[in-house]
């Protein structure tokens, strides 16, 4: 039995009537009462990812199928490769990431990463993945097999499902940049029981538990990747990014920006005497250092125009009427 309420009723010494009769009837069965455990938020994300229709799966999981088996894909590795296990964990106050790197000889490198900022479980998963990829590159690894128990993160990185969250889209763009430095990179989803080492490290990191012997400890003060910050008075809902599922590793990311009223978009500033690209530098200065021209009219124009632009991974993009972010390129 998994309900405290039922236990309180059946073990109530003041119970009368039918309640007392039920308690007497059930006493012979030696019922064991256990509390409900909290559902990890990643389970909900995996459920949504599993039931979201895709070109290869128009319905949902096969209800008649047995327990999930570790996914098997054939990566194209031309030499002995490393293996990366990653996992993220979130508690009430803290979040953490766990990473295990295994070299071709079976030797392991383990990392606990304390995330000292407010994070969701999916953010923690992405931080673990990005940290693991970065550490692998710093060790000279160029062929890597990545395994994780988050279906959502694995499917987004592989391009099997879309990413509609601005923060996760920023993480995904960062992962795309890291992918280019690998000669061979394969991601596989595995059940949680096959990812127990990374799961234990992430749980320890999120609770600030003692560091086991041989485990490296790291601290992260801010997210590795962030979406473009909005100006004062803007709502977060006006800058929703979406990375499409159909994404090739060698292509630049196609980012979609949903705006409240595309008809309110303002035309670009006309080129000033400083050169044809002056307006780009003016908007960039406003985003970066909140610098505006001395002229009140020009300053107001820059503030209004900046609402139609976004900074993604250090590049300036204009949000078109169809929702596509167009990268601003100088004429040089």
Image: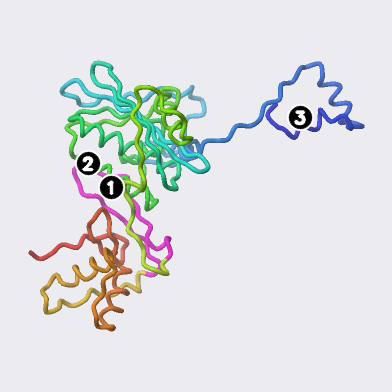
Quadrant of the snapshot with the C terminus:
bottom left
Asked where in the image residue 161 lies, by quadrant, the reply is: top left
Q: Position of residue 55 (x, y in %)?
A: 36, 40
The residue positioned 45% from the left and 31% from the top of the image is 204
The residue positioned 41% from the left and 67% from the top of the image is 234
| Whether residue 70 is visible | yes
Give me the C-alpha separation between circle 2 and circle 1: 10 Å
Q: Which residues are magenta?
A: 235-261
Q: Is residue 169 magenta?
A: no
Please, is residue 234 above or below residue 245 in the view?
A: below
Asked where in the image residue 176 lies, by quadrant, the reply is: top left
Secondary-structure class at tag 1:
helix
Q: Position of residue 130 (x, y in %)?
A: 30, 39
Q: Give the residue at mark 1.
A: 173
Q: Position of residue 138 (x, y in %)?
A: 20, 34
The numbered mark, 3 or 1, whose residue comes first in the sequence reads 3
Secondary-structure class at tag 3:
helix
Q: Give the residue at mark 2.
A: 249
The numbered mark, 2 or 1, whose residue comes first in the sequence reads 1
Give me the C-alpha separation between circle 3 and circle 1: 50 Å
Q: Give the residue at mark 3.
A: 7
């Amino acid at each position: 039995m998994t309900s405290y309420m039922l236990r309180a009723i059946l073990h109530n010494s003041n119970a009368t009537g039918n309640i007392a009769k039920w308690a007497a009837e059930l006493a012979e069965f030696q019922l064991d009462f256990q509390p409900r455990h909290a559902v990890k938020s990643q389970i909900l994300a995996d459920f949504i990812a599993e039931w979201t229709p895709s070109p290869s799966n128009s319905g949902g999981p096969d209800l008649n199928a047995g327990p999930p088996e570790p996914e098997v894909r054939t990566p194209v590795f031309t030499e002995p490769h490393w293996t990366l296990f990653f996992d993220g964990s979130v508690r009430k106050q803290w979040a953490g990431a766990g990473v295990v790197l295994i070299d071709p000889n079976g030797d392991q490198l383990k990392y606990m990463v304390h995330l000292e900022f407010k994070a969701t479980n999916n953010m923690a998963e992405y931080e673990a993945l990005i940290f693991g990829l970065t550490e692998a590159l710093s060790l000279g690894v160029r062929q890597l097999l990545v395994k994780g128990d988050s279906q959502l993160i694995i499917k987004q990185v592989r391009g099997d499902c879309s990413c509609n969250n601005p923060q996760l889209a920023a993480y995904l763009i960062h992962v795309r940049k890291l992918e280019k430095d690998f000669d061979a990179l394969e991601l596989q989803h595995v059940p949680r029981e096959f990812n127990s080492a990374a799961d234990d490290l992430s749980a320890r990191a999120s609770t600030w538990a003692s560091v086991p012997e041989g485990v490296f400890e790291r601290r992260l003060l801010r997210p590795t990747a962030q979406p473009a910050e909005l100006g004062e008075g803007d709502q977060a809902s006006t800058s929703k990014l979406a990375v499409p599922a159909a994404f090739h590793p060698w292509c630049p990311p196609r980012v979609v920006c949903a705006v409240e009223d595309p008809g309110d978009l303002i035309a670009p500033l006309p080129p000033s005497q400083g050169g044809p690209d002056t307006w780009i530098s003016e908007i960039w200065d406003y985003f970066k250092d909140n610098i505006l021209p001395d002229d009140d009219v020009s300053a107001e124009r820059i503030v209004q125009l900046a609402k139609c632009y976004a900074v993604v991974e250090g590049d300036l993009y204009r949000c078109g009427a169809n929702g596509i972010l167009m990268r601003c390129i100088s004429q040089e």
